[in-house]
Image: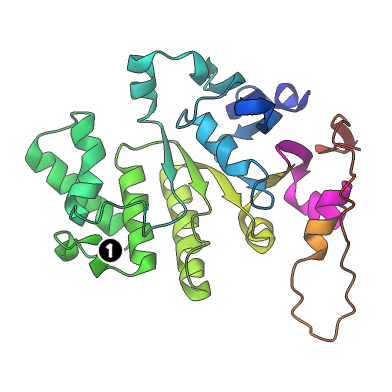
Amino acid sequence: MPVASRLPQAMALVEVEHLVKEYRRGTRAVDDVSFAIEQGETFGLVGESGSGKTTTGRCMLRLVEPTSGAVRFRGENVLAFDAARLRRARREMQIVFQDPHSSLNPRMRARAIVEEPLAIHRIGTRAERRARVEELFRLVGLDPSHLDRLPNAFSGGQRQRIGLARALALDPSFLVLDEPVSALDMSVQAQVVALLAELQARLQLTYLFITHDLRLVEQICTRVAVMYLGRVVELGPTASIFAAPRHRYTQALLSAIPRLDPDAPRSRIELDPAINLNSALREVAAGHWAAI
């Protein structure tokens, strides 16, 4: 698939090439996935539960070991790194997990949670690490006077901010955001999304935004890849895909977005379960690819 190769190489921070994750009995959670993420952009990866989007993100960071393929970060294949090189790469690539309730150790105080990456990588003296933790707490909109609290003393939105502070501790350039607001109330979602946009501009971050919420994708992602049963079935600029989806699965997803007007006519598209997944991606408009 030519998507990654067509992007200007100076602009592509991350390139995923023919990524496969196969489990026992030949089941492929990720099946020949390719895309590239430009430096500074928010790239969306969307699909229903079980589509393979979370596994793709974790394979990119080698939290899950892929079966085959390549993941290039600044031109280097992450999947070829030995343990020492992968450890160094962790300083530039981090993840924010979906559930802020289960991703934080309930027995560790917030200070220790945020400081842990600095301690693991032996960065700074104890006093320097404490100062850095306070700086990170302020950066994500939390009060440093609460650093000695346990996670259960914080709200869901505050816990997700602690997870974000932990991810930013090593000053990464690339973040995988795995459903970062799906467990939060709508009002809190908006606050966290605004914070992510502010941090991206301030710290020059690049995001892979994994979600099933198409309204969020339309709001914050510059480009998007749509996954279905482990494969990318459509990829391109967000505006182009929302205006003129070409794959039947994308059309079905978009037709399911709730409408603000209750009197608006419904045009829900039912997906044919016998849909063909063997079609290769082809360019249907400028930068817009679909497996049709």
Please tell me in which quadrant of the rendered image residue 257 appears: bottom right
Quadrant showing the C terminus: top right
> Measured from the top left, where is residue 75 in percent x and y?
55, 18
Please tell me in which quadrant of the rendered image residue 94 appears: top left
**Which residue sits at x=7%, y=42%?**
127
Q: Is residue 77 visible?
A: no
> Measured from the top left, where is residue 15 in percent x and y?
61, 26
User: In the figure, 235 relative to 272: above or below?
Assistant: above
Please tell me in which quadrant of the rendered image residue 225 appears: top right
Between 19 and 143, the one lying in front of the other is 19
Q: Dot 1 corresponds to which residue?
A: 142
User: In the figure, 235 relative to 165: above or below?
Assistant: above
**Residue 14 part of the magenta-drawn span:** no
**Which residue sits at x=18%, y=29%?**
122
Quick one: which residue is furthest to the bottom in this view? 263
User: In the figure, 154 relative to 69: above or below?
Assistant: below
Residue density around tag 1, few if under 14, some if 14–19, many if 20 or more, within 10 Å:
some
**Which residue sits at x=51%, y=36%?**
58
Quadrant showing the N terminus: top right
Between 57 and 7, the one lying in front of the other is 57
Task: Give the side of residue 225 with respect to residue 140, left or right.
Answer: right
> Measured from the top left, where is residue 169 in percent x and y?
29, 42
The magenta stretch is 229-251
Q: Secondary structure at mark 1?
A: loop
> Measured from the top left, where is residue 156 in percent x and y?
38, 67
Q: How many marks?
A: 1
Task: Give the side of residue 118 with respect to residue 22, left or right.
Answer: left
Q: What kind of residue is marked 1? A: Leu
**Colour basis:** rainbow
Task: Give the side of residue 156 with respect to residue 132, left or right.
Answer: right
Q: Is residue 74 visible?
A: yes
**Residue 235 part of the magenta-drawn span:** yes
